[in-house]
Each structure stands twice: as C-alpha cells, then as structure tokens.
Image (tube, grey):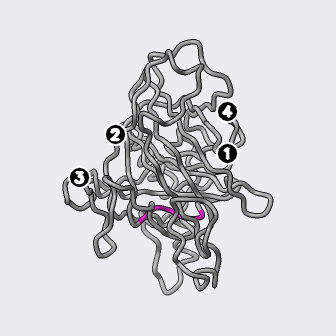
Amino acid sequence: MKRIALTVLAFSIALATPAVGLAKDNAGVIPLQAAPASLRADAAYLLLRTSKAKSGMFAIQHVLLRIPGAQELDDYRAAKKLAYDKALPELTKKAKDGKVPGIDQFEFDYAGKANSFVVDSGKFLEDGELRTILLEVPAGTYILYGSTVGGRGLVTCNCLGTVSFGAQAGVITDIGSLYVNKVHKPSPIPHLEDNLGPSMFQYGFVLGQALVPAEAATPVPAALQGLAREPARFEVVGEYYEPGAGGINRLAPIPGILGYDRGRAVDLRTGKPGQ
C-alpha cells in the first residue's frame, strides 16, 4: 500500500508519517454497526453523520488522519531508512542526469501501523438522509484530511486549510455532520464551496468537504444516549504539504470557527492564522 506524508505546520514539526492505506489499512479503526453496551477505557470513539455522494458506482468518502506519536515516527523513519538504503543502488543506477532522489522523495510500502483511514460510509449505525457512523479508534488528535472515491487513493486533500480535534479514550467525540462531493460544478449537497467552475475539470475532478459541528439539537441515536459523549473541540490547521494527493482544496468555512483571509486559514475565534 502506498502511504502518504504529512507536514502539519500547526505542530511545528515535519511529520513524515506512516499514513494512509486507502484501500485497506491497519489504523486500528473499527466501524460499529450496533451501539456498544459500554465504552472501552482504552479506546476512543468518533460519532459523525455523513452525506452519501457518489462518483459513478463508487462512494465519495472522507479521509481522517491521526497525528502519530513519537514512537510511531521513530519506527517509520527507521523502516524508511532501511528501505532507502536497500533501494539506493538501484535508484542510483536509474537516476536521470545523475540526480538520485533523496530519502525525503523516496516512496515505499510501510508495513507498520497506519495513522489515517477512509471513513467507510457503507458501515453505519443508522441510515437516513445522512448516515450516522460510530467508529472505535485509537485515542489521539485527528485531522479532517481530505476525500477519496471508493477508497482508492487520496483524490483531494484539505491542504489549504482544515481543522483538527482530540479524541479522548472512554468517550464518544461527536464531530457533527460531514459533507463531501465533486465541486467543479454546483452540488446539490449543502454547505460545500462549489464555485470553482467547470474549468477545474480539465484534468480530473476536485472534491470538496464541509463540516457542520454538533450542537445541542444535533440528533443522537437513542442507543448512545446513556454513554459518555462530548462535542469535538476544533482547532484550525493551516496549509500543509501532501505529495500523495491527486488534487488540493480546503475545508469549507465553518461559521464562528474557520474562515479564510486572502486564501489563508484563520481561526475566527481569535483572528489568528491556522497553525
């Protein structure tokens, strides 16, 4: 599986991450199609509602990324160094004009634990106009990273601005409602920025993603009412570099949380640029 690298400026560190296995992954994510009787103390839970857009026969789906821990980064970097050293003779032999790609440009299939995943909209807790999805995930900080079609490669990343949120163990973190669709032409799905214009379809379509945070009136399945649950607390994430994406876009503005000033992501609560 091809994995992608993330540079998250918000964390003041370049994260060469063990990232998405977009078709199948080992990110430790379990879609729950029945409400649990109790919550595990060693796992976090994400609750979300998602639109049901398609491209042809394939579902358009959300991609989330968890910020990896220090040990995960060390393991990834060690594995990449071993793979690069092994491949270096062949890379040198094939190098054009004597320019051998460095380790930062080197792609390899990482067998370790993934830190991002596709939200499978076909595995849901409740169906309806929006599908309600409950995921059991590792605790950590997650990013609304981008979108894909049928789980086949990262079609569009939110490289120009998005949000992150924490997921605490033993608690259901309610993200709210997520929307996604093609945005090279007006979409019937609400909340998306769809004014990019048909010229965006010259080489392939661009996907757009939007978030409506959970509030008191947001419907919650009755079976989850007695379980520990809290709304996600969002932080604004600025631009980041993602070489593995087919296209780039930004998460649609979120009133009171995420806006854009001359194209730069801004935290509307503080007026400061995204980190």
Q: Is residue 182 above or below residue 35?
A: below
Residue at figure coordinates x 52%, y 57% from the top left: 146
Q: Nearer the viewer, residue 80 or 158?
A: 158
Residue holding disc 1: 129
Residue 56, position in %: x, y? Answer: 78, 63
Q: If you read the primary sequence from the N terminus, does the residue marked by circle 2 or circle 1 appear first?
A: 1
Q: For this view, does 247 lie left or right of residue 8?
A: right
Q: Which mark is residue 233?
A: 2
- Mark 3: few, some, or many residues within 10 Å (few <14, many ≥20)? few
Q: Is residue 173 visible?
A: yes
Residue 225, position in %: x, y? Answer: 51, 19
> Alpha carbon of mark 2 to alpha carbon of mark 1: how far?
25 Å
Query: Which image quadrant is residue 28 in?
Result: top right
Residue 188, position in %: x, y? Answer: 64, 63
Residue holding disc 4: 126
Q: If you read the primary sequence from the N terminus, does the residue marked by circle 4 or circle 2 appear first?
A: 4
Residue holding disc 3: 269
- 81 within the magenta span: no
Query: Which image quadrant is residue 70 in?
Result: top left
Magenta segment? 155-159
The quarter of the rendered structure image containing the C terminus is: bottom left
Q: Nearer the viewer, residue 266 or 136?
A: 266
